Image (spheres, rainbow, N blue to C red):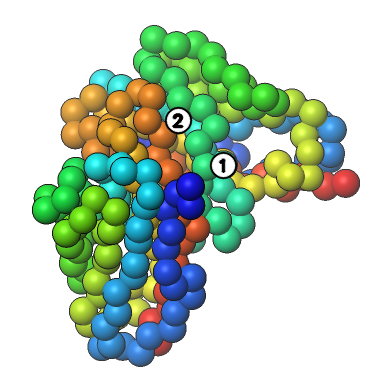
Amino acid sequence: KNQVEQSPQSLIILEGKNCTLQCNYTVSPFSNLRWYKQDTGRGPVSLTIMTFSENTKSNGRYTATLDADTKQSSLHITASQLSDSASYICVVIPTSGTYKYIFGTGTRLKVLA
Amino acid sequence: NAGVTQTPKFRILKIGQSMTLQCTQDMNHNYMYWYRQDPGMGLKLIYYSVGAGITDKGEVPNGYNVSRSTTEDFPLRLELAAPSQTSVYFCASTEGPSYNSPLHFGNGTRLTVT
């Protein structure tokens, strides 16, 4: 069964610190893997998109990595800010059934001053 | 560009009532989706559409209906509301399911059925 699992479920860090969020998936084969940020009360917003052949993709202080061999991805946030407080969702798009995006349950990040 | 607009933002329904959740996008996207998001769960696909006049079921279509008469609009209809339909509903659109096309989401409709 195609699944996307994220860890930790929730995380609290101090402003200015770095953190790494994990995504493990069983989707195979897959077309691309995405990370989204979802602020409370808002819809998710795209952060990064990587194909299966890419190892890393950056968007400002956000850096996503992908290891297709171990079926793992991570999202690293550098020098966190209060505005980084949100849920971060990993999404995998299978090669077949390309309309069926598979969403992880998300990691809820809280950044404290 | 307004992007994807959903209305209403909040709604409380009694069991058995019906309602339509509105979704419109101004990006001329062919692909549109309806998801529901329950606490602690990933987004689940209800229905999707690959163009005007074409719709298909997702993972959890029971109790819902959709139509796509124009490229811009993709309303979701609940005919007989049930408590199990209490959720946050998100509409999304994209140019296509390709590498360079992110999903654009609306800000959701929070529905409570009592």
Determine the image quadrant of residue B51: top left
Q: Is residue B38 visible?
A: no
Q: Residue A59 carries which label?
A: none
Q: Residue at x 56, y 37 (%)?
A: A7
| Disc 1 packing (10 Å; few <14; some 14–19; many ≥20) | many
Tell me the element at label 2: strand
Query: Is residue A95 placed above or below A43 in the rendered structure?
Result: above
Pointer 1 residue: A37
Horizontal and vertical percent for residue B54?
12, 50
- Between residue A39 and residue B101, name the one nearer to us: B101
Numbered circles on residues, count? 2
Pointer 2 residue: A34
- Between residue B100 and residue A38, name the one nearer to us: B100
Tell me the element at label 1: strand
Q: In this view, does B33 lie to the left or right of B112?
A: left
Q: Residue at x 35, y 61 (%)?
A: B23
Q: Residue at x 20, y 49 (%)?
A: B49
Horizontal and vertical percent for residue B70?
21, 56
Which residue is situated farthest in the right direction here?
A113
Q: Which chain carries label 2?
A: A
Q: Is residue B15 left or right of residue A77?
A: left
**Circles 1 and 2: CB atoms closer than 8 Å:** no
Horizontal and vertical percent for residue B110?
46, 70
Query: Is residue A72 placed above or below B85 in the rendered structure?
Result: above
Determine the image quadrant of residue A56: top right
Residue kind at label 2, given as amino acid type: Arg
| Disc 2 packing (10 Å; few <14; some 14–19; many ≥20) | many
Horizontal and vertical percent for residue B101?
37, 30
Q: In this view, does A24 lie to the left or right of A57?
A: left
